[in-house]
Amino acid sequence: MISIKTLGQFIIEKQADFPYAKGELSRLLRDIGIAAKIVNREVNKAGLVDILGSIGDSTNVFGENQKKLDVFADEQFIAALKDGGECCFVASEEQEEGILLTDTGVSKDAKYIVCIDPLDGSSNIDVNVSVGTIFSIYRRISPLGESLTEQDLLQNGLKQVAAGYIIYGSSTMLVYTTGKGVNGFTLDPSIGEFCLSNPNMKIPSSGKIYSINEGNYSKFPNGIKQYIKYCQEEDVASNRPYTSRYIGSMVADIHRNLLMGGIFIYPQTAGQPYGKLRLMYECNPIAFIIEQAGGKASTGTERILEIEPQELHQRVPAIVGSSEMVDKVLEFIAQS
Ligand code: P6P
């Protein structure tokens, strides 16, 4: 009889790691797990019902075309966080200002803030490529019952109390950390539970995979161009040439590199001086997870987790993955 440990059992068990925990963070993580199962159900049948494709000319706050599943996922996670009652504010890629849940009936004692990308990589939905959800959890700083301030909403990544992602792929997995390692859970549809499948995940210190959109090569900074050429050179001793793997869905690229070793790079270009990826609900949570798994996460000039955020939707360049590979990119950048 294979012993099954569900996400709920694991969360309760690990709650003991936090002596002052009263179960609120545990409930919050479980609320996210429930919404993930609902989103998974719709992602898996997107081809069968009219939930594919774009919502006419609907665009998100950045003018990017909104997919029906984007909006559905956003609604599900916000509803789960509202019903769960542990979250006082949600910052979502799909919401320009964020949502003050204490204005919608959630208790003024709710102490957590969630930053979320409800369905990352959604441009891949219509072609049946893996997509994902990315979330980041902070504890509010201002006293309970008082109004939230910008200080509550713009905390640096080192202040995260938890972070995770869900990948809706050949199987659906939830991977998260609370700062004491990284654990992965695979959804067993037959029992409707996320079950512990990848305990204590560690990213190899090096690997053979580099993930970057080489179509933008001509726009990359010189250090990044030199690193790409380094990856393509023949050198048996250092296992090169590496393999190029780029899905265009950050969660899928990061998840593969976490398991196999590798590096993911989304650099700045002249047209996108801060890159494309968002700090608060893409780069910070992924950086927390990868560092907890033994890897590194840099913008090329600073550790992502140490960036002092200036606004909810700010973008940062990302160089994330196996520690030795990130170090090599930073070497090329420093020399360029
Ligand atoms: P590009 C998806 O839109 C996303 O935000 C990430 O998931 C992904 O890594 C990146 O953008 C892909 O961007 O410009 O290479 O298509």
Image: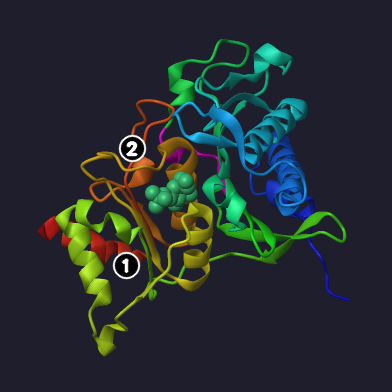
- Residue at (69%, 63%) from the top-left corner? 171
Drawn side of residue 178 relative to residue 188, left or right: left
Residue linked to disc 1: 325
The residue lying at 68 percent from left, 35 percent from top is 72
Label 2 environment density (alpha carbons within 10 Å; few <14, some 14–19, many ≥20): some
Decide if residue 326 is on the left or right side of residue 45: left
- 303 horizontally vs 223: left or right: right
Question: Which secondary structure, mark 2?
Answer: loop
Observer able to see residue 165: no
Q: In this view, does 153 lie above or below 196?
A: above
Q: Is residue 88 above or below residue 45?
A: above
Which quadrant of the structure image shows residue 155?
top left
Label 1 sits on a secondary structure element that is helix
- Measuring from the top left, give residue 215's x and y in whole percent: 31, 58
Q: Pick whichever of labels 1 and 2 is earlier in the sequence.
A: 2
Residue labelled with disc 2: 307
Q: Which quadrant of the figure has residue 78?
A: top right
At horizontal 70% and vertical 49% (from top left) the residue drawn is 43
Magenta highlight range: 156-164
Quadrant into which the N terminus falls: bottom right
Q: What number of labels is visible?
A: 2
Q: What residue type is labelled 2?
A: Ile
On whether residue 58 falls in the magenta region, the answer is: no
Figure check: 61 above or below 14: above
Could one spot residue 235 in this view of the protein? yes
Measured in 3D between alpha carbons, the distance from the residue under mark 1 to the one under mark 2, in whole angstroms, is 21 Å
* Image location of residue 75, percent across then percent down: 68, 31
Q: Which residue is most to the left?
A: 335
Of 6 and 189, nearer the camera is 189
Q: Is residue 157 magenta?
A: yes
- Across and down, in percent, residue 192 comes to 84, 54
